[in-house]
Image (spheres, rainbow, N blue to C red):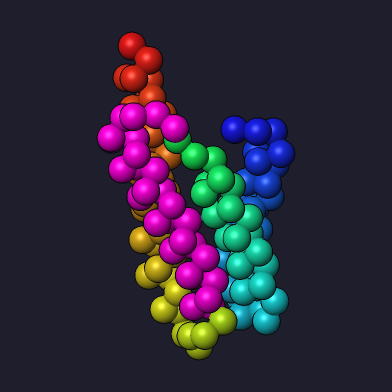
Amino acid sequence: MKKSYTYLMMAGAILLLLGAMLQITRWELSPVIYTIGAVLFAYVQVMDGYQGQNLIIRRLRRQQILGAVLLVFTGVLMFVMKRNEWIVCLTIAAILELYTAFRIPAEMEKEKT
């Protein structure tokens, strides 16, 4: 991963967390902060591709991209829905992202040996 992608991903993750925390207080700019963070985070994940032939890693990458898309969709739900329905979408996205964050490096390590 390029160094600029690393900084974009960290900034996106911080904005994601900050926007989700502020959304609980119902601050009107929190969906904007969250959505900007989600777009940055998703952009980096989509652009950081896998060029290998391992089918397991390719499947995990698709799941990771689905999680990133759901993070952005959560931002849309924050704008559209008036209650806390966005939490369900955020939970699904977080589970996908967490799962792939552990499984992809493990599969890449297996691939090297």
Left-right relation of 23 to 88: right
Above-or-below relation of 25 to 92:
below
Residue 107 magenta-highlighted:
no
* Quadrant in which the C terminus appears: top left
Give above or below for 65 relative to 77: above
> What's the residue at 38%, 34% (across, down)?
104
112 shown above or below 34 = above
* Residue 15 placement, left or right of 68: right
* Figure quadrant of residue 4: top right
Looking at the image, can residue 50 be seen? yes
- At 34% across and 35% down in the image, what residue appears? 57
Looking at the image, the residue that sits furthest to the top is 113
Side of 32 relative to 95 (left or right): right
Q: Is residue 85 above or below residue 33?
A: below
- Main SS of the magenta part reads helix
Residue 30 point in image, percent of width and height? 65, 73
Q: Residue furthest bottom?
A: 82
Quarter of the image for residue 75 reads bottom right
Number of labels in the image equals 0
Name of the residue lying farthest toward the left = 55
Looking at the picture, how far across and down is residue 32, in whole percent? 66, 72
Magenta-tinted stretch: 51-78
Q: Is residue 21 visible?
A: no
Task: Tell which of 23 and 2 is nearer to you.
Answer: 2
Whether residue 61 appears in magenta in the rendering, the answer is: yes
Residue placed at 58% from the left, 60% from the top? 38
Residue 13 appears at what percent x and percent y?
Answer: 60, 51
Q: Nearer the viewer, residue 28 or 4?
A: 4
- Asked which quadrant contains residue 108, the reply is top left
Closer to us: 106 or 19: 106
- Could you tell me which quadrant the N terminus lies in? top right
